[in-house]
Image: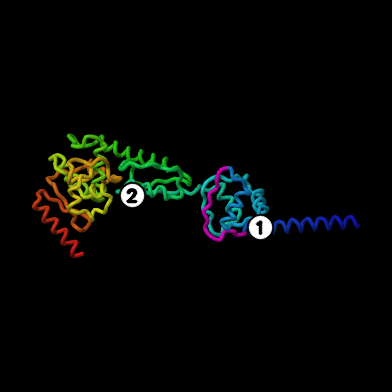
Amino acid sequence: MILRNKLLLLIIFKVFLIYISYIYLEKVKIEKIVFQDTYYLLKKNTNQEKILKQLKLKKINIEYFKWRIISLIREDHFVPKAGEYLIKKNSTIQDIQDIFQNEKTIVRNFKLVEGTTSDDLKKSLLENPYLSGKIKSLKEGIYKPDTYYFKYGYSRNKLLERMKLAQDKILDNIWKNKPKNFILKNKEEFLILASIIQSETGNLNDSKLVASVFINRLKKNMKLQSDVTLAYGLNINGQKITKNMLKSDNPFNTYFHKGLPPTPISYPGENALNSLKFVKKTDFFYFVSNGRGGHRFSKTYSLHKKNIKLWKNSISKD
């Protein structure tokens, strides 16, 4: 009888332990331990104890015992994968383990804006905290303005290689289909002129007319007389150009030198590049802003002076 009672008590005790363990486990499984959305970079070969230490620094406190319990009762074997993750607010331990094992890592993006210069690009690349590696001086024009996607720690130089390949691809395609008897001798000259057009206007229809003006001037051996090239050469805002500056022998001063400047002055987008592929045939040799984001075009200098007066009037009204 005594033995029987002992066995009964043992069974009751075991059942009680199982019940308490079940209650504890269920509590651990549903316990919300993340109080705000948190980004976390999980590096390769980081052991689980170090993961918990790093999470603690981000105010996500997890007891190692609880972490191990959840990892042991998982249906699949828990193997955390390296990458950058977003741990969402109100996540549980199981949620975090699911993220580290099953979710895709965060994809970042970098945007090169049309008309950006190499100085601007270099600064943006170096200030991006999700990219890695050093970069040397950058060439103008050779990178394609676009949005590029990458994961944490991606090499800046690899990103630049992708940007160059993208620009080469579109440049090669357009150059193959260039107009017959094209005044530009090679892809480098093509890129230089496209960069000037890009800096003058971002509108495709307007850029075709701007392109026609520059092409017509090159054919007539006229100076391009572009403010944007001089502004680039002097590293100033185009509105601050003075009459004395127009007389300088700066290599980018197209009021002083005939032909194209020595290098591109920005990274031209597809509109600027295509403006030379689909360049309109016109008799225009001059253009000036119309004060509304576009330009007025003219065949003669006398009409051009009238258009300049209209532009100045629109500025004074504003």
Compared across the picture, whether 69 is left or right of 100 comes to right
Give the class, few, some or many, for how many residues have Cα within 10 Å of label 1's Cα (few <14, many ≥20). few
Please name which of the two marks, 2 or 1, marks the residue nearer to the observer.
2
Quarter of the image that includes the N terminus: bottom right
Element carrying mark 2: loop
Give the class, few, some or many, for how many residues have Cα within 10 Å of label 2's Cα (few <14, many ≥20). some
Compared across the picture, whether 84 is left or right of 22 comes to left
Residue range highlighted in magenta = 31-44
Element carrying mark 1: helix
Counting from the top left corner in percent of width and height, residue 68 is at 66, 50
Q: Kindly give the residue lying farthest to the right in the view shown.
A: 1
Mark seen at residue 299 = none
Counting from the top left corner in percent of width and height, residue 193 is at 23, 42
Q: Which residue is mark 1?
A: 26
At label 2, the amino acid type is Val
Q: Residue at x 17, y 53 (%)?
A: 243
Residue 32 covered by magenta stretch: yes
Q: Quadrant of residue 239?
A: bottom left
Is residue 198 something that shows in the picture?
no
Query: What is the distance, in whole Å, between disc 2 and disc 1 at their CAs?
Result: 51 Å
Is residue 68 something that shows in the picture?
yes
Is 155 rendered above or below residue 22? above
At label 1, the amino acid type is Glu
Of helix, strand and loop, which mostly describes the magenta segment?
Answer: loop
Compared across the picture, whether 20 is left or right of 157 comes to right
Counting from the top left corner in percent of width and height, residue 177 is at 24, 36
Q: Which residue is mark 2?
A: 113
109 or 2: nearer the viewer: 109
